[in-house]
Amino acid sequence: MKIDQKFLSQLKEDVAARRIERGIAGLRAHETLLDQLHPGMEHAAPLLGYLAQWVDIGFSKPARLREILKRFDVPVRLQLPVNDYLYVRLAEGMVAMAEQCVDNAIAHFDVISTLGAEWNDKQSLAIAHFWKGRCLRMKGEYDKALSYTVRGKDLAAELGLTCMAAVMQVLESWLLFQKGKLKEASAISHEAETALAGTDDHVALGNIYSFYGRVARREGRYDSAIDYFQKAIEEFKKRDPKHPNLARSLANMALAKRGIALQLRRRIDRDVERQRKAGSNHDGKRAPGRIDYRQHLEQLRKEALSHLDEATEIYRGHPSRHGVATVHLNYGYLHLDNGDYHLAEDQSATAFRLAKEQHDFIIMGRARILQCMIENAKVEEEISEGADPGSHARRALEYIQEGVELAKRTQNRRVLTSAYLWQGFTHCNAFFDSPESARESYDLAVGNQKGDLLPDNMWRDLQTLRAKILQKSTIDPKLKAWSQGSVGDKTFQQISEEFAELIIPRVWESEGRKISRVATRLSISPKKVRRILTRSGRLKPNKS
């Protein structure tokens, strides 16, 4: 059989223009050719490279491409021209990426980057850069991932491939979002959505809606997040009712509903406390038209578990250790919220094991944080373990210390901030009761956020930890150290800045939380007051 040059050109053009149905239809019309593809055919290597790109889009499974690659073994490759050799490495990199062997995949893409100047297919070179960016994102190396993603996007744009560049912008916006550049990320995402609106690339469009959902969830706009995740799900289903990205959106939907459930739980707790203080003889009946919060809470929990069950089923057909580990983590959070500590422990342990197999430090760190949360919950409820009442507290500290170290191996600042926060909560628990150590962790958490807009739940955790420290502390440790002449190697300017961070929040509280009044009282600029309040965790950073 011969490989028609017109067929090859059509595959390449359809990838660039994101004509997905047309490209897949063309491949299905050539199934026999694909089954018989071997190195002896003219144009076999380019077809292999384009097939890899279409497998990534959703035509067939990576296992099929892996079988074809076996025909292009080492002796064969040694005889190939450089251009053909790079197509083989591109296909191998794609298979490794799909199987989450990211270091192996990156090695293939590095070869392509090194020899890329000699490749006559700059479109495929752009894709290689983009795929390397995706692999680096999986490793949590966001700066490098952004660099390669932008390199691929710029090359695609230079070639006039607007739709292909837009697909790469979707990843670019996600990486900027991870780096706290929300305004820039949103602008790029909207630009990509406009470029892809006339295409049938439902996966890319679904990823954009999923991004909007992640932004809304971080801001605590859970209803909007759910709407966006639902739109993402609808787009993914247009491509494949069991698309793996669908499972990811279902897991995100579960987290959004958990966020609403936590809000309801706080509302219920406030109502109970208010009734207790008022000595109310409330009979449990609710006023006509008033929402039954407990019933709504249980309904949200059932829906969240159902979403995770559906995601689990999808991952059975599309194995992804990262995806499956994330689902186990989300199960763990729901079980912890419900007080099912044994189930939460099982789920968090499974998530950690799966992540460890792939050296996925982000999920490993999150799993250790969850395990710390579980142990701290046991301390709070005074659940003893044998003759050692401090076992849960010590285990919590061990988990979170490892969680901090794992988070430091990535560029995911939110995971590291969360780890510092729970290290602080652990130092503050009933066993350790060390507000000084907790304050150190709190300061690390505040310093690590670097002006980022924190997720709603993390913001609440920050405020809760601060309140616990203030409740347990009498004299701020910094003031105590300064009063004894202990300033370390800090300059007077640095000490002045730290003193401002101590005094301005207190004056702000005493002045009714009015920035203008603090500025007048202390004769400093409102801008400096706002900056210090933001840095100390009292005000949310402005969106950027």
Image (spheres, helix red, strand yellow):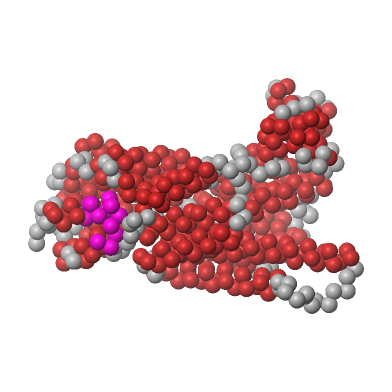
Taking the view exactly as shown, the residue that stands out farthest to the top is 492
Residues 78 and 239: in front is 239
Please name the residue shown 71% across and 42% down the image: 538
Give how far across and how far down residue 109 sits, in percent.
Answer: 31, 45
- Whether residue 22 appears in this view of the structure is yes
Give the quadrant of the N terminus: bottom left
Left or right: where 188 falls relative to 87:
right
Residue, x 76% and y 60% (percent of image)?
Answer: 380
Q: How many marks?
A: 0
- For the point 37% across and 55% down, the residue is 197
Looking at the image, which residue sits at the far right?
279
Picture coordinates of residue 335 (x, y %)? 63, 67
Query: Looking at the picture, does residue 443 appear above or below residue 73?
Result: above
Tell me what residue is drawn at x 35 percent, y 65 percent. 239
Most common secondary structure along the magenta stretch? helix
Check the picture and name the quadrant holding the C terminus.
top right
Between residues 518 and 315, which one lies in front from this camera angle?
Answer: 518
Report the front residue among 18 and 24. 18
- Compared with 93, 524 (above or below) is above
| Residue 98 spot, x, y in % from top left | 36, 57
The spot of residue 96 in percent (x, y) is: 34, 54
Read off the magenta span: 11-22
The answer to whether residue 329 is seen in the rendering is no
